[in-house]
Image (cartoon, rainbow, N blue to C red):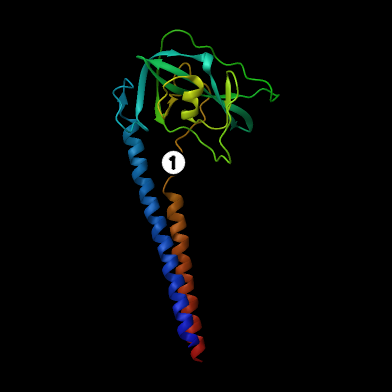
């Protein structure tokens, strides 16, 4: 009876470990497919907001228009080379459509109550970038936006920013091309990890299953003695 219970327990553990390994393998394959999609879409350039597909994420976009630097948004807690700072976002109007553009990173002043000197961008400019979902962090409670601009925020909540700015912003952000003459320091990268981590996790689960199998065989042989 003891041997039967041990065998059933071992089988249950092995099934769980193998399932976890297979799940990590499937996650790795999903990441590979997503990386292919990112690569493909980033090479497809659009030249107006109106021409974008229903799901425009990760496509390249080139626009002509004007920045509204009077309604700047500062994404807080952005570290770069050990220094705290902000990502600077400005609304941008092109062909009567608005989009929020992430210009990049700027260092924070030494005191919290100070705001960095922000670039003032006047006149019509041409910008290019990658369409991306907004940067978000875990929130324990909805963020209360302050009064006045520049607006310092912990997350890019575009629904809240639409209400706060009064602009019909789309639910995505244009991450500016690092080569753009108006770009600041670029620290943004697509938040998509490669498949290698998942393959490594899958290997760990499979090795654990192999180890459990070996220990089970050893115990069963030993118990016969």
Read off the residue under disc 1: 192
Which residue of the protein is positioned furthest toward the right in this rendering? 111
Quadrant for residue 177, please give it.
Answer: top left
Q: Position of residue 150 (x, y in %)?
A: 58, 19
Work out which residue is located at the far top of the displayed protein and give it. 123
Indicate left or right for 150 with 15 as reference: right
Count numbered badges in the picture. 1
- The residue at 36%/50% (across/down) is 29
The spot of residue 194 in percent (x, y) is 43, 45
Frontmost residue, 97 versus 44: 97
Q: Look at the picture and state if 113 lies above or below 202.
A: above
Residue 84 rendering spot, x and y as whole percentages: 63, 30
Residue at 44%, 70% (x, y): give it. Answer: 14
190 or 74, nearer to the observer: 74
Q: From what the image shows, is residue 2 above or below residue 60?
A: below
In this rendering, is residue 41 above or below 104?
A: below
């Amino acid at each position: 009876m003891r041997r039967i219970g041990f065998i059933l327990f071992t089988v249950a553990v092995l099934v769980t470990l193998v399932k976890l390994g297979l799940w990590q393998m499937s996650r790795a394959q999903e990441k590979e497919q997503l990386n292919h999609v990112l690569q493909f879409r980033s090479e497809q350039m659009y030249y107006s907001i109106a021409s974008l597909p229903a799901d425009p994420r990760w496509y390249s976009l080139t626009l002509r228009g004007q920045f509204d630097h009077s309604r700047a948004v500062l994404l807080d807690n952005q570290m770069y080379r050990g220094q705290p700072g902000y990502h600077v976002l400005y609304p941008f109007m092109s062909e009567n459509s608005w989009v929020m553009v992430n210009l990049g990173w700027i260092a924070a002043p030494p005191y919290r109550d100070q705001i960095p000197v922000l670039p003032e961008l006047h006149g019509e400019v041409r910008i290019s970038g990658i369409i991306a979902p907004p940067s978000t962090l875990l929130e324990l409670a909805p963020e209360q936006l302050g009064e006045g601009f520049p607006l310092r925020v912990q997350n890019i909540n575009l629904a809240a920013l639409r209400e706060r700015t009064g602009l019909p912003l789309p639910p995505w952000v244009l991450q500016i091309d690092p080569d753009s003459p108006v770009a600041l320091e670029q620290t943004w990268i697509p938040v998509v990890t490669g498949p290698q981590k998942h393959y490594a996790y899958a290997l760990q689960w499979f090795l654990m299953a192999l180890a459990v199998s070996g220990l089970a065989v050893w115990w069963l042989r030993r118990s016969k003695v």
